[in-house]
Amino acid sequence: MLRIHYVQHVPFETPANIAEWARERGHPLTGTRPYAGETLPSPESVDWLVVLGGPMSVHDVGECPWLADEKRFILEALSKGCGYLGICLGAQILADALGAHVAPNRHKEIGWHPVTLTPEATRCSLFRGWADRFIAFHWHGETFAVPEGAIPLASSEACVNQAFAWGDRALALQFHLEYSRSSIEAMFDSADDDLDSGPYVQSREAILAQADRVEQTRELLYRLLNAMEAGMSERRMARNDRGARG
């Protein structure tokens, strides 16, 4: 089993289908809500860290002072061999913690939009067998630069950097595969002001008209999590084997 721990930044952005996958696979899942004053765990108690989205910026440390502690926690967890999946804000936090620039994107990107994998992604085990282009859900106004030493994995028409891998255990996704239909409805209830005019901002009606895509993105999520799980299990077995040999 892998001890999975998620960091949640607002009440309405939950692990959603990641939690369902963890339950089905038998992995213990815990979480921290730093915005509610909860304390992050010891990095040694986590095998896999999942950092979720949120409406704040990585630079909003004044309004969200817990962001500074979270960035330090992420770097410490990575230094101890923890796996990492960052989604939307979670991807931007990882980029920022690794020294890359995070700033407003030229366009907001909200709704169901295509994502194109880079040539590097097609050679990456995490995306083995994926189509070069797929539809994902988006809800973001900022973007990240790819950190030094990381591998760019995906882009979209509205946003050049949609994913990167750092080392063999950290993955950042700007887009959402984890959302359920209730996740999308929660975004409407809590962040409806984001749905202003823009070339890559879909209306509530247009988004809900494509809600059947949730099942397609859930299948992609499960494939990705299965691949990450396999990689972490292999690395754990290799470490244990080296330890047994002394």
Image (spheres, rainbow, N blue to C red):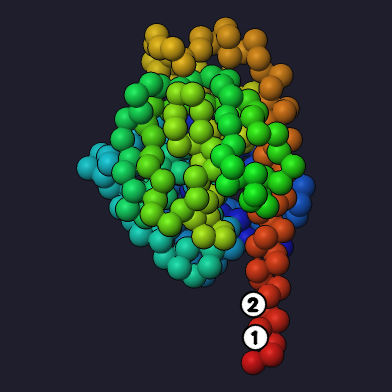
Residue closest to the eye, 229 or 52: 229
Q: In the structure shown, which secondary structural element does the residue marked by tag 2 occupy?
A: helix
Q: Which mark is residue 243?
A: 1
Direction from residue 51 to residue 133 in the image, left or right: right
Q: Amino acid at mark 2?
A: Arg
Quadrant of the rendered structure where residue 140 is? top left
Direction from residue 177 to residue 194 in the image, left or right: left
Q: Residue at x 38, y 21 (%)?
A: 107
Quadrant of the rendered structure where residue 109 is? top left
Residue closest to the eye, 114 or 50: 114
Which image quarter is the N terminus in? bottom right
Q: Which mark is residue 239?
A: 2
Which image quarter is the C terminus in? bottom right
- Give above or below for 239 relative to 130: below
- Give above or below for 163 relative to 99: above
Residue closest to the eye, 157 or 135: 157
Tell me whether circle 2 and circle 1 mark residues in contact (CB < 8 Å): yes
Q: Amino acid at mark 1?
A: Gly
Q: In the image, residue 212 lies at what x, y percent?
A: 71, 19
Q: In the image, residue 58 lies at what x, y percent?
A: 33, 42
